[in-house]
């Protein structure tokens, strides 16, 4: 199932949408297959309040990443805890900062530089 920003809850978290699922048939690069516990972030918003929402993938081998989502890679577990980063992305101050750095009027992606931590 190809994930979209519609798979995010506005307050943060994963939303299964089986009735509106988008499926891809064909060869899939391994880098696009998400694993349980992977952290993704909504990089666009079509409805106010979705930009920057974080979600944790609930199952391995089912969901595919796409260009409207950010995949958060933690270089070393000593650097940061994935669950802490998830809650950080879904906190009000961080969401306000991301929203304030967004460009565009209809689909608002954040500027890459604004998301570096």
Image: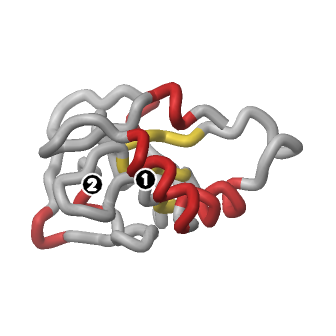
Q: Which of marks 2 and 1 is in front?
A: 1
- Quadrant occupied by the C terminus: top right
Depth order, front residue of 72/112 = 112
Depth order, front residue of 104/44 = 104
Q: What element carries label 1?
A: loop
Question: Hey, which quadrant is residue 20 in on the image?
Answer: bottom left
Q: Residue at left 29%, top 35%?
A: 103
Residue lying farthest front? 100
Q: Residue at left 56%, top 41%?
A: 72
Horizontal and vertical percent position of residue 42:
37, 50
Disc number placed over residue 52 in the picture, else none? 1
| Neighbourhood count class around disc 1 (C-alpha, 10 Å): few under 14, some 14–19, many 20 upward | many
Q: How is the image coloured?
A: secondary structure
Q: Can residue 65 be seen in this view?
A: no
- Give left or right: position of 16 versus 13: left
44 over 13 or under it: above or below: above
Disc number placed over residue 5 in the picture, else none? 2
Horizontal and vertical percent position of residue 22:
14, 53
Disc number placed over residue 100 in the picture, else none? none
72 over 52 or under it: above or below: above
| Neighbourhood count class around disc 2 (C-alpha, 10 Å): few under 14, some 14–19, many 20 upward | many
54 over 98 or under it: above or below: below
Depth order, front residue of 36/96 = 96
Question: Hey, which quadrant is residue 108 in on the image?
Answer: top left
Horizontal and vertical percent position of residue 111:
41, 30
Between the residue at mark 2 and the residue at mark 1, the CA separation in whole angstroms equals 10 Å
Q: Does label 2 or label 1 sit earlier along the sequence? A: 2
Residue lying farthest right? 78
């Amino acid at each position: 199932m190809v994930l979209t920003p519609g798979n995010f809850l506005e307050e943060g978290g994963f939303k299964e949408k089986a009735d509106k699922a988008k499926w891809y048939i064909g060869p899939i690069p391994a880098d696009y297959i998400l694993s349980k516990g992977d952290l993704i972030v909504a990089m666009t918003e079509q409805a106010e309040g979705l930009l920057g929402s974080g979600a944790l993938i609930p199952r391995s081998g089912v969901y595919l990443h796409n260009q409207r989502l950010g995949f958060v890679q933690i270089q070393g577990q000593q650097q940061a805890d994935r669950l802490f980063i998830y809650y950080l992305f879904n906190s009000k101050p961080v969401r306000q900062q991301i929203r304030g750095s967004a460009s565009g009027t209809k689909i608002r992606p954040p500027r890459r530089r604004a998301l570096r931590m």
